[in-house]
Amino acid sequence: MLLIDDLHASIGDTEILSGLSLEVAAGEVHAVMGPNGSGKSTLAHVLAGRDPYQVTAGRVLYDGADLLAMTPEERAAAGVFLGFQHPVEIPGVANMYFLRTALNALRRARGLDEVGPVEFLAIAEEKRRLVEMDRMLMDRPVNDGFSGGEKKRNEILQMLLFEPRLAILDETDSGLDIDALRVVAAGVSSLRSPDTAAILITHHQRLLDHLVPDRVHVLAGGRIVRSGGPELAAELEAHGYAGFDTRCSRELPAPIGSGR
């Protein structure tokens, strides 16, 4: 489904990804771990097409098509979803309105009929219960005044509504309590199928205790330096990144919604 070949990406004159290669097949869940500043969030945002990253070399194929040639909107329509590490707040825009508008924009792009208000209410209520989110949050502005856990539940709610083929979750587990972590893992698991895939970017094994990945990768210095099975996450939890080349570009101010 996804093939990343020798990917280089920069912000300005500073290279962050330095020849990253990764292949994710349909039906698989991959975890990407690594120290701060190694390029994990940069990888997520490059795949989603966010500014201000510039791809300087390499290629990314999604279902055989050139992902880098697509606009962010085209990537979303093709089934690519990015869950932010720090979800943005949108004051003045009701969560329910945002969700229905975004869902119908995706459906139009995919040649499907729009979902009417009554039908959407039923769908949204079903997904809201799955993520155990307070009903009142549906009528409040998007993420405005939400706690960290409520924002992450809202991200998973979006993912369940949009039904992506490739979900990229950028440290969605950060700052979550045990209950919220369980909900996030259950949400990702509910989308797992032979036709979908997920990339989980995380610092910790605790999410992977609930959602066992097919492969675990260590990203350090802007490239994948080691890959293995789920046991690699346990090794990293026990010993950290000692022995890995963790040299990376200098820290840069992170764009809104990111945690490079």
Image: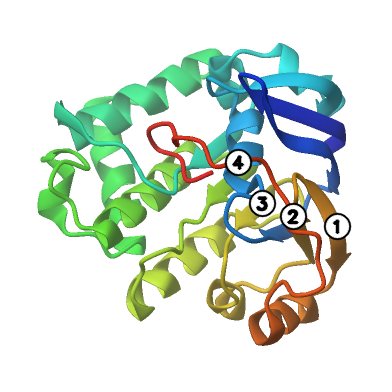
Is residue 113 at least partly visible in the picture? no
Q: Closer to the N terminus: mark 4 or mark 3?
A: 3
Please give the residue where the numbered disc 3 appears in the rendered image.
199
- State which quarter of the image contains the C terminus: top right
Looking at the image, is 159 positioned above or below residue 207?
above
Residue 107 drawn at (x, y percent): 48, 22
Q: Residue at x 47, y 37 (%)?
A: 162
User: Which of labels 4 and 3 is toward the front?
Assistant: 4
Look at label 4 and name its amino acid.
Answer: Arg
Q: Residue at x 22, y 43 (%)?
A: 143
Look at label 1 and name its amino acid.
Answer: Val
Which of the pair 166/121 is nearer the observer? 166
Please give the residue where the numbered disc 1 appears in the rendered image.
225
Residue 36 drawn at (x, y percent): 57, 56
How crowded is the residue under tag 3: few (<14 C-alpha within 10 Å), some, or many (20+)?
many
Looking at the image, is 230 positioned above or below residue 214?
below
Q: Closer to the N terminus: mark 1 or mark 3?
A: 3
- Report helix, strand or loop for mark 2: strand
Please give the residue where the numbered disc 2 appears in the rendered image.
219
Which of the pair 90/125 is nearer the observer? 90
Q: Are marks 2 and 1 in contact (CB under 8 Å)?
A: yes
- Report helix, strand or loop for mark 3: strand
Tag on residue 250?
4
Which of the pair 190/258 is nearer the observer? 258
Which of the pair 122/169 is nearer the observer? 169
- Report helix, strand or loop for mark 1: strand
